[in-house]
Image (cartoon, rainbow, N blue to C red):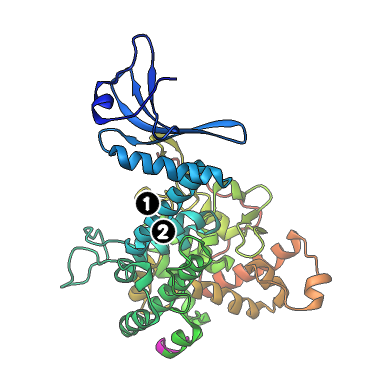
Amino acid sequence: MNRERLTLERIKRFTCSNGKRQDFLWDSEMPRLAVRATAAGAKAFIFETKLERKTIRMTIGDAAVWTLEAARNEARRLQTLVDTGNDPRIAKAEKLADTAAKQEAARCADMPALEVWHEYIEARRSRWSEKHLADHFKVSKEGGELRTRGRRPGESDKTQPGSLRPLLLLPLSEITADRVKAWLQDEAAKRPTHARLTFALLRAFLNWCSDSPEYRSLAHSDACTARLAKNELPKKAAKNDCMQREQLPAWFGAVRRIGNPVVSAYLQAALLTGARREELALLTWENLDFQWKAINIRDKVDGERIIPLTPYVASLLAPLPRRTMMVDGKQVANPWVFSSPAAESGRLQEPRIGHNKALSAAGLPELSIHGLRRSFGTLAEWVECPAGVSAQIMGHKPSATAEKHYRVRPLDLLRMWHTKIEGWILEQAGIEQPAEDAKPGLRVINA
């Protein structure tokens, strides 16, 4: 072992021997200290000793940066750790980890909550419906995109930022109860219903942050309390929009005149099946069985349910166009019954626009898409349909012991009542119901 008292001049003259990848010049004053020279010309102070009969070596630092005295002091400190039974490599790793943790904490404290929001969406998106996911993107969008539709006279042709974005641009630690209260007061004054939805999304987000070890110390879990919502949001009124029997002729007349056959069929099917908005929108051609007259619906509660495909609904759905769509740069068959070539998803996204125009043209009061579902349940009583039958068709959970445990209705029984309900509604609208054994029309192929 080449050992000399290290000096600046000796270190400067020291080079790696020919044919070697590295060479060492050991210090006689601090025996555990050496200068390592590599074939590439680099020089560094290193520390080498034994711990539990095993050799350990650590790099102290670049010889051009560290002074000789500082290197000797560091070697003495490291030897002291070894003498007390501690591995200096572990101590160094722990120090680096602690420094990295502090740096990450500082970064998280300063970065906008919007970055955490996107992380939250990615962590939860597999558990959410398509609509719930779209709501999160909508309330946090940047804004500024050009409007393609829905602009009122005098309004800007650019979209506004999402209602939650001003809060999300703040650091997570600054989203406090006072800030949320001020934001909620402003939102509730403009759009109380939307403010209620946005507040619920924000509360779920902050709860997730509170459960996350990375963001727990930054999130204010008390920023969205139930008391705040109760005090700042107007009382939620139960909706009771429902179509009356005498309104059926005007409604069907206006809806059947809608230029888009997909929207027209969707609205009529919504009324005649009582299905939820997204349950019907997510209907695929594989869910329809024209032979056995059945529809397999993705049930919001139970995962799926099978309801009858009644004669008139079958005649509405069968002629709808089958289209193609681009997926990952490839042209594939569009699976959706209510397809849309303009939508990125390939399916109908917003039936309310056409519906509202039809209501206005018919001189009818406002009626939501969910109001069509409510109308089905109400109009079914005109044919004295058992409440359990209409509830099963609509996908309501059984509410009585007899319904839960002693009623197993086959599809044929549901079909008998469902066909009666459809026939009565069509009769009131002045529309003839197709015969049950009538074959639905051919579907139009439209690429």
State the image coordinates of residue 228 (x, y, percent, origin top left).
44, 86
In the rendered view, would you say 387 is above or below 11? Answer: below
Among numbered discs 2 and 1, the one appearing first in the sequence: 1
The amino acid on which the numbered mark 2 sits, given as a three-letter code, is Gln
User: Residue at position x 60%, y 50% from top?
Assistant: 288
* Mark 1 residue type: Ala
Whether residue 324 appears in this view of the structure is no
Q: Residues within 10 Å of mark 1 (few under 14, many from 20)?
A: few
Provide residue 250's location: percent of width, then percent of height.
42, 75
Residue 234 on the magenta span: yes
Q: Residue furthest top?
A: 19
Q: Which quadrant is the N terminus positioned in?
A: top left
Q: Residue extending furthest right?
A: 406
Q: Nearer the viewer, residue 7 or 99?
A: 7
Q: Quadrant of residue 366?
A: bottom left
Predominant secondary structure, magenta span: loop
Residue for badge 2 = 349
* C-beta proximity under 8 Å, tags 2 and 1: yes
- For residue 70, which quarter of the picture? top left
Name the residue tied to disc 1. 343
Quadrant that contains the C terminus: top left
At mark 2, the secondary structure is loop
Residue beneath the point at 44% across and 32% down: 31
Q: Over which residues does the magenta segment extend?
A: 232-236
